[in-house]
Image (spheres, rainbow, N blue to C red):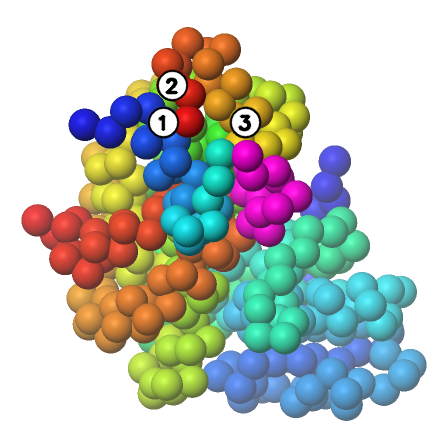
Amino acid sequence: MPDNRDKLRGLLLDVFLLDPKEFRWDLKRSQIDTWDSLGTVSLAVGIQDVFGYHLTSAEATGLSSVEDIVDALRRKGVAIGDA
Amino acid sequence: MMPEPEVWSLERLLTENLGVTSVWATPSVRARVAARLPFPVRASLAELEPETQTLIVVGGGTLIDLAKVWRRDHAPSLRLIAIASVWGSGAEGSPVAVTHQAGRKIICVDRSLVPDVRVPWLDLAESLPPLVQRRGCGDAWSHALEAFMSPLATPELRGETSTLLQFLRELPIGSDPRWFEASVAACRVQAKSSVGLVHGIAHTLEGLLATAEPEFGWGHAALCSTFLWPVLCLDAALSPKPQELCRQYGLSWDAFLSSARSLFEEEAYDRALPVLEAHWTAVLRDPCTRTNGVLVRPGHLDHFRLRAFAA
């Protein structure tokens, strides 16, 4: 069973269509060309599908890095271990 | 509030004083239009005289969208009257236009794109083959269902769309004048939210297939009709959200699946599948796919490849 960190990594690869080799946990939004406004919508949909949590519009648009996504999920009670 | 075009009957169109008027009609109906309307019929917008005051565009969504964008960009004072050759796109009553730039589909939503007048012309639609009429129904169904499930839809919009979806269930798949109103309503609700994977597939494949198989009659509506059922099945397999939304608004998901299944075209699917496989990454990158109600992932191509929906 993949843990939540693996689930999140898989989700981000699919949402942003990233090559696994280019993924890092310290990626910023500005470094991901598919993280535009539609990417934010896809991310919110994906987080709801995978983790069952609804991100508000303000929460989703306020995310600016992968670390922000991890922090947001932890605040929702999703256990994500350190990388 | 987005403006709405006036709705005229064909009789009113024939008696109104429209000033200097030209008609731009799609080839499939040009002869019938020329026989019925007492205005010169042009083969292209380049043939319009500079003093033209009214342009009547008669055709499918693509032609009407071209006229809407051309009027906005080149002749904003021109009166634009839109007549859909068949229902489905709803382009004749919406603020949306889909255009091409450098081989990519660009979706514009702008109040200045709304035509001034639309004219439902049932006889014209009924002169087209039944398959074209059915595909128009699939186009409208796709707009309404994807708008309903869109992550950008508000509760108010979902309420409005649920009423429309119940109305669509009352309509036959085929000729019925009520499809004109339903199509315009469906297009207007998707303009306020978004569409999803059905449209991502249609926008990516329609040009490729139309070029590769011009004799097959490929177009936006054919792809929407063919992929609506497989996509709804994928959505439901991935998430309980579609069924939950339906329950919340007093709708029957199974009834929608049944309608979508009745629109499915086996032969079209078989022809389109290899092109879908070859261009799946482009489908995933399409803006419509990225606002699907359920997240679409690279691995979901197997759903289509293995025909999981037909199991």
Q: Give the labeled residue for mark 3.
A: A67
Taking the magenta stretch, the answer to whether it contains residue A40 is yes
Image spot of residue A22 (x, y percent): 47, 50
Write the residue at 70% across / 46% down: B4
Q: Identify which amino acid the numbered label 1 is placed on.
A: Arg
Whether callout 2 and callout 3 share a subunit is answered: yes
Image spot of residue A58 (x, y percent): 64, 22
Q: Give the labeled residue for mark 2.
A: A81
Circle 2 chain: A
Under tag 1, what secondary structure? helix
Alpha-carbon distance for marks 2 and 3?
A: 12 Å
- Asked whether the viewer can see residue A58, the reply is yes
If you read the primary sequence from the N terminus, does the residue marked by circle 1 or circle 3 appear first? 1
Circle 3 chain: A
Under tag 2, what secondary structure? loop
- Residue B286: assigned label: none
If you read the primary sequence from the N terminus, does the residue marked by circle 2 or circle 3 appear first? 3
Q: Identify which amino acid the numbered label 3 is placed on.
A: Glu
Write the residue at 44% across / 63% down: B282
Quadrant for the N terminus of chain B in the image: top right
Image spot of residue B64 (x, y percent): 62, 68
If you read the primary sequence from the N terminus, does the residue marked by circle 2 or circle 1 appear first? 1
In the rendered structure, the answer to whether residue A68 lies left or right of residue B137 reads right
- Residue A5: assigned label: 1
Alpha-carbon distance for marks 2 and 1?
A: 7 Å
Residue sitting farthest toward the front: A83
Q: Identify which amino acid the numbered label 2 is placed on.
A: Gly
* Segment tinted magenta in the rendering: A26-41
Alpha-carbon distance for marks 1 and 3?
A: 12 Å
Please tell me how crowded label 2 is: few (under 14), some (14-19), or many (20+) other residues with Cα within 10 Å.
few
In the rendered structure, the answer to whether residue B127 lies left or right of residue A28 reads left
